[in-house]
Amino acid sequence: MSEKIRIDKYISSQTTMTRKEIKKLIKQKGVKVNSIVCTSPDFKVSTDMDKISINGEVIKYKKHVYYMLNKPPGVLSASEDKKAQTVIDLLPDNMKRANLFPCGRLDKDTTGLLIITDDGDYAHRVLSPNKNVYKQYIATLDKNANEDIVEEFKKGIIFSDGTVCKPAFVHSINKNTVTLDICEGKFHQVKRMFAVLNYTVIGLKRVRMGALCLDDTLDMGQAKELSEEVAFSALKNIV
Ligand code: URA
């Protein structure tokens, strides 16, 4: 949808530049609108009709972006942190822009599928437990899993504080590796559910959210952009 917005707002939404830096750039004649030098930060531009360039490079306006990251261990699922490396730090410069955040959190040691976006409404929909969208995890346990966990997960695991989890579904068991589908995102949920059944999770990887599967050609720490259609498949369960 076409929108008319201030050029400084336009640039700050598409890049990591601050308003101050944008003002300076405009002063230095670094910004052009349809090949004409822009002289004022409050100049209004159309998000789909006008061609904006920064130092000669044309910006392709996108209201929102959706990235798939293959999260490596040891990285925080946060937008910023004073000490630790975050999932946003892993993005290459050409993918970075303002307001990016991880759509839900994976523990620091958990790996696999993480969506990064700047679309708050989308994140809300993906994460809402009321939507019952299933996320698939591969858990490596400290010992071989017994078949009876299938029923336990289906019944709904009860944490020691009385919290009842929604039914979870074991997709497959191979010795100490269990593939499990859950539709909630409680703190350390998978690890805590297995702990109730006397297993310790020693490795955890998320491989699917709704109908969106982790692209296994992505190296650990690598990200790729998703089309809106593919990103929104995370809201649909595979039946
Ligand atoms: N459940 C966990 O215990 N940890 C995660 O990172 C995700 C789900």
Image: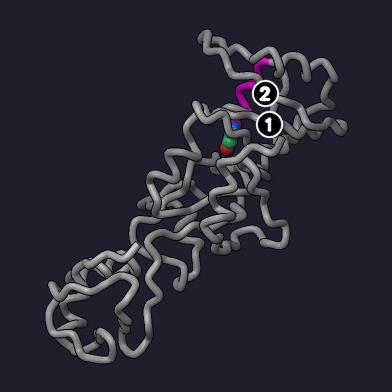
**Amino acid under label 2?**
Ala
Q: Which mark is residue 82?
A: none
Evaluate whether residue 187 shows in this view.
no
Q: Residue at x 69, y 39 (%)?
A: 238
Q: Nearer the viewer, residue 40 or 146?
A: 40
* Neighbourhood count class around disc 1 (C-alpha, 10 Å): few under 14, some 14–19, many 20 upward: many
Secondary structure mainly formed by the magenta segment = helix
Q: Residue at x 55, y 52 (%)?
A: 231
Q: Is residue 231 left or right of residue 41?
A: right
Q: Is residue 164 left or right of residue 64?
A: right
**Tags 2 and 1 in contact by the CB under 8 Å rule?**
yes
Q: Quadrant of residue 25?
A: bottom left
Identify the element where label 2 is drawn: loop
Evaluate whether residue 6 shows in this view.
yes
Residue assigned mark 1? 181
Magenta-tinted stretch? 191-196
Looking at the picture, does residue 201 appear above or below residue 34?
above
Q: Quadrant of residue 149?
A: top right
Looking at the picture, does residue 120 appear above or below residue 24?
above
Q: Which mark is residue 168?
A: 2
Q: Nearer the viewer, residue 14 or 50?
A: 50
Q: Is residue 29 left or right of residue 195?
A: left
